[in-house]
Amino acid sequence: MKPLLPLAIAAFTVLFGLPAHATAVYHYERAEGPARTLVVDAAGATVATLTDGARTAVFRGPTRTFDEPAATTATVTTRDRVLLAPRPWHAGGETDGDLRAWLANTLAGSAPDRGPDVLDIAMQYRRDTPDLVNANGIRYAGRAFFGPVVAGERITGSDFVDYLGVPWTYDDGVTQEPDPLHQDSLDCSGFLRMVFGYRSGYPVGRTPGPGVLPRTVSDFATAGPGTVVVPDTGTAPSTAQLATLLPGDVLLFDLDPEDGPLLDHSGLYLGLDSAGQPRFISSRKVHNAPTMGDRNGSSVLTGSGVFARVLREVRRL
């Protein structure tokens, strides 16, 4: 990583997982590749990373472990907590209105929503996960299928609306009705729209547009929001490029060679696993559910596995 570039004095005192009488002093440093702000504590540890042009931010929190024993022996143990800022970050965001208030509240452990973060939410759609139902009786989490079988083949086309089984009205006023054929299902981009959009509050679009989550993987690549961390050069990223990834990053793959260079599969980066390999979760046709497992292709971005070979672009939303 390039040397950190200290800003002018920009420290403030907040509470962060400490008793009410205790305080922690933070300062801000700038880093490049991609451009971002680091929140650093008095001991020199980075407690938050906020990337220019992205709303997803990574905070240090309690240690937790993600696993999927039925599909892999690997686990991901992390202190990273992925949260959504009210708008895209920029240099000096720590002094800017709602971004400043949101950052202070989050560091203080007093953010309005202390529920599951992006990574927790992503884990709630795998096989053998319990159903979660809201006060209106809508099942909003629990095992998701990839999609229905039509003419002997499992098809794409399952969005978050279909999983929920209720209509959704977009900002342009158009209401989308769920397709009963696709109920309880999420294809790979539908999974991202569920995790980041419906559950985390990122705007979802009916068509591609600024600041919204588009429907298809190819639209994520060409018109997706956020910051490109690894650009698509037609080949797999280098080890140095993979080292720039943060949990919560969106991964875009060229999984089907028959459609040319079109990017056609997406996933969500979790972090380094127990073997030191970069591991992700995605909703997959053959597995017929979101998985971080290794059946029908290892969920890692290094080595000779299919997903490592066909990763093309990484975005930080």
Image: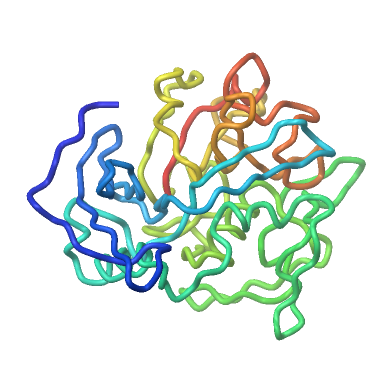
The quadrant in which residue 11 appears is: bottom left
Which colour scheme appears in the figure? rainbow
Counting every numbered tag in the picture gives 0
**Considering the image in quadrants, where does the N terminus appear?**
top left
- Asked if residue 207 is positioned above or below residue 171 in the image, the reply reads above
Depth check: give the residue in front, 134 or 150: 134
Residue at 27% from the left image edge and 43% from the top image edge: 36
Residue at 60% from the left image edge and 40% from the top image edge: 77
**Going by the image, does 99 lie left or right of 237?**
left
Instruction: Give the image location of residue 23, x and y in percent.
Output: 29, 64
Instruction: Give the image location of residue 178, x and y in percent.
Output: 73, 69
Depth check: give the residue in front, 274 or 178: 274
**Going by the image, does 6 lie left or right of 62?**
left
**Going by the image, does 200 lie left or right of 157?**
left
**Going by the image, does 122 lie left or right of 95?**
right
Instruction: Give the image location of residue 290, x and y in percent.
Output: 73, 46
Instruction: Give the image location of residue 114, x and y in percent.
Output: 51, 69
- Asked if residue 217 is positioned above or below residue 299 in the image, the reply reads below
- Asked if residue 129 is positioned above or below residue 222 in the image, the reply reads below
Instruction: Give the residue furthest to the right.
Output: 152
Instruction: Give the residue furthest to the front.
Output: 21
Residue at 57% from the left image edge and 77% from the top image edge: 169
